[in-house]
Structures are given as structure tokens and as C-alpha cells.
Amino acid sequence: MGVEIIFKIAIIGILIAIVSQVLKQVGKEEIATLTSLAGLIVVLVMIVDMISELFSTVGEMFYLF
Amino acid sequence: MVEILKIIGLALITTISVIILKQQKPEIAVIVGVAGSVLIFFYLVDMISDVFGLFETVVSKTNIDSELFIVLIKIIGIGYITEFSANICSDSGNSAIASKIILAGKLTIFLLSVPIIISLIELIVGLLQ
């Protein structure tokens, strides 16, 4: 749980942008949208895991549950 | 003291990476913003528990019953979470959803504090008779 998570997500975002640009140049439009969708899902899974940890910490710390 | 510097560094890195990602992938920029604020909260967790420890010692000294203190901490928690998500929504542009979240937070806090208000009123009525 350090800074590297932010770098990971940023790197994934930049990679997806590049890959979809390259695929658009080659002419594979549909694969470009699929790769950007796949990258988005990977990032979403990471952030959902972090948010669930946040909610459990807040709930147990503030006696909300 | 070092804690605050780490948090500021993390916040700056997050802001910069959000700006970098804004042009190509705005959705991932929002996610980086959320990740940054969640990380800052995790840095603050032990500070918050220290503050609550101090509160507890103060409450145990004065004979206020801990029920009020628990409700107070709950209200603080709800306030924090509501403000956290409302700011993220308004940052990403949809301030309508943010105001709905704030309304929901206010209602929850009000419902939590109703028993305290009732006990206060009973106390006052008792004094007046």
C-alpha cells in the first residue's frame, strides 16, 4: 500500500493509450477498443479492491458496522 | 512530522499523474485520483486512532456515558466518507451526484443524532418541572 499503486495504474493507462493508437494505425479498430476495455477492467479490479479495503477500515475504525 | 511530507508528496504525484492521463484516458485519470485519496487515508489511519484514544481518555475522565461518544465517532466517520465520495464525484465533473451524496450523508447523520436530541429535550423538560 504505497506510491507504487499509483504508478502502476498510471503506467497501465499510458500503455493502453499507446497500444490502442498503434492498433488504430494498423487498422484493427475493434481490437483497439477491446484492449482499452480490457485495460480499464484491470484497473477497475485494482481500485475496487482498494475501495473495499478502505470501507472495511473506515467501518471498523468509526464503529459504523 | 515526516508523515505530512509523505502525504504531500503522494498528493503531488497523484495530481501530476491525473493531469498526464486526462487527455488520453479520462476514466483512468479519475481512478488514479481515487487511488491517491484512498492511499492518503491509509497514511492517516494511525493518526486518527491516536486522536480517538485522546478523546476516549477525556470522555472516561468526565462521566459522560460512552454512548454519546460512540455516536459522535459514527457521525465523524459518515461525514468523512460522504465528503470523500462527494469530492471525487465533483472532481470528475458530475456535481449533481455529489450533491445527492451530501444530502444522503446529512440525512444519515440526522437520523443518528435524533436519540441524542430526544434525550436532551427530556433532560430540559425534567429540569423545567
Image: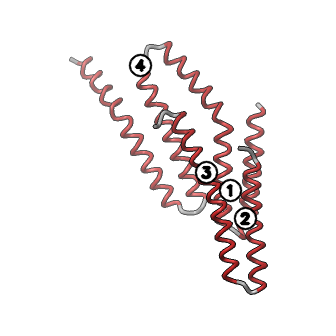
State the residue position of label 3.
Answer: A49
Is the C-beta separation of discs 2 and 1 under 8 Å?
yes
Whichever of labels 2 and 3 marks the residue nearer the N terminus, that label is 2
**Most foreground residue, A49 or B87:** A49
Q: Nearer the viewer, mark 3 or mark 4?
A: 3
**SS for tag 2?**
helix
Confirm whether circles 4 and 1 share one chain. yes
Residue A49 placement (x, y as % from top left)? 61, 51
Q: Nearer the viewer, mark 3 or mark 1?
A: 3
Judging from the image, mark 3 belongs to the subunit labelled A
The alpha-carbon separation of the residues under discs 2 and 3 comes to 18 Å
Confirm whether circles 2 and 1 share one chain. no
Identity of the amino acid at label 3? Asp
Identity of the amino acid at label 4? Asp
**SS for tag 4?**
loop
Q: Nearer the viewer, mark 2 or mark 3?
A: 3
Identity of the amino acid at label 2? Gly
The alpha-carbon separation of the residues under discs 4 and 2 comes to 51 Å
Determine whether B23 is above or below A64 in the image: below
Which numbered circle lies on residue B65? Answer: 4
Q: Which of marks 4 and 2 is in front?
A: 2
Is the C-beta separation of discs 2 and 3 under 8 Å?
no
The alpha-carbon separation of the residues under discs 4 and 1 comes to 42 Å
Identity of the amino acid at label 1? Val
Determine whether B71 is above or below B90 in the image: above
Which numbered circle lies on residue B32? Answer: 1
Whichever of labels 4 and 1 marks the residue nearer the N terminus, that label is 1
Q: Quadrant of residue B27?
A: bottom right
Which numbered circle lies on residue A13? Answer: 2
Local packing at callout 2 (Cα closer than 10 Å; few below 14, some 14-19, many 20+) is: many
